[in-house]
Image: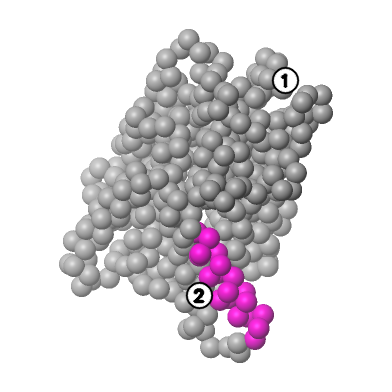
Amino acid sequence: MNDNDKNQIQRKLRLVHVVAIGLAYMSPFAVFDTFGIASDVSSGHVPTAYVVVFLAILFTAMSYGKLVKRFPNAGSVYTYTKNILNPYLGVMVGWVSFIAYLALPMINALLAKIYLSAGFPNVPGWVWIVGLIAVITVLNIFGVKIAASVNILLVVFQVLVGVTFIFLTVRSIQTGPEHFMSFAELFPAANEYSGLFGAAALLALSFIGFDAITTLSEDTVEPKKNIPRAILLVASIGGVFFFTVTYFMQSLFPDVSLFNDIEGASPEIAVMIGGNLFLSFFLGGALFSVFASGLAAQVSASRLLYAMGRDKVIPKRFFGYLHPKFNSPVLNIVLVGAMALSALLLDLEAATSLINVGAFTAFSFVNICVVKSFFTTERKRSLGYVLSNLIAPCIGLLFVVYLWVNLALFSLTIGGIWTVLGLAYLAISTGFFKKNPPEIDFDELEA
């Protein structure tokens, strides 16, 4: 065996392993987090809203699969956009996509407040937000890591809670006055479609991370075949799970305006269908998910800031600092934690929309890259090739654009400001686009 063989990553992951890790990234428990808000916005059509966002994700997943085959050793929309469209545009797409990861710790803090306030209503909500962020920040400074195997166990536990939730919900429907939603009831009235797509834009949060498995290409057996399959399987399994859970929840509670707190509707439902014992089980799964996700989100964002500072893309003195004792980017971790404190000023709907600004940017440009490749690649234009490489990504892009239109104005404004800041810095750092843009390892975000 030569030295090059020794330095190569051994391909050990098979399709089942990649799918399991992809589901761990996606966090199935997200289905409970926004049910109350989505039901209110969609006028009681959360299952249908999940179908809409799933279609957008499915066509986008197909586009990811095609780009993985073309770039099997890279896994970021930054890399795809840089090589297929334009290097400067690639940097901007990566920059805007990054806002989702900066906002994820804020989402987890808000969810912790919602769940813990349900169990301890007399404690002020800000205590849970500040407490979670402080604990996660301290642990990340000391270099806490969550192994992939732990994440997989977490997914299994979340699915177990979901299955139990479905069982108790079905039992409640069968013994009560409610009925299972009919096929006709899944469709909204003519004046409710705007709310349906607004809810779909919010629910895209549930699919955040399904594309992260593209970074496992070098670890996977036959990546050009297994990674695209895994992407479609993860998106499909998530879509079926989300639809199933919300179908039974919506059947039991067609009107969530009756709840004391729409944001905290899921804990209230847990009490109604299973009593305080199931509420404890439910809150345990929720907090475990929120805590693990918060740890991973903060360390991922801080590591990318460190990588950018180390490579002098942003000021190295601050962002490229590594603590000599803890061997962690302490200043970046504290900065991300401080930004997460904005959860004190926002509600879950606004925070979720803000995350989707980054996600929709990535989803949009993945589809655009496939369309551009269709016109620049020289090969025979068969009907199947046209359908899969032009029509499918265009459909995916149209779905994502429609979700863009339904995002909250607040999120679009913040996203616009973030984009302008990135564009200004890129212009200055490249002598107003006279020099090549810096090489940024955006894959470090999900490594």
Asked whether 425 falls inside the magenta stretch, the response is: no
| Label of residue 274 in the image | 1
| Percent coordinates x, y for residue 183 in the rendering | 74, 48
Quadrant of residue 318 in the image? Answer: top left
Q: Is residue 310 visible?
A: no
What residue range appears in magenta?
Answer: 382-400
Q: Where the N terminus falls, by quadrant?
A: bottom right
Q: Is residue 412 visible?
A: yes
In-image side of 24 versus 198 (left or right): right
Q: Residue furthest front?
A: 190
| Label of residue 439 in the image | none
Residue neighbourhood size for the residue with mark 1, other residues' Cα within 10 Å, grouped as few (<14), some (14–19), many (≥20):
some
Q: Is residue 359 above or below residue 258?
A: below
Q: What secondary structure is found at the residue carrying circle 1? A: helix
Sequence order check, earlier mark of 1 and 2: 1
Residue type at the position of mark 2: Val
Residue hosting label 2: 371
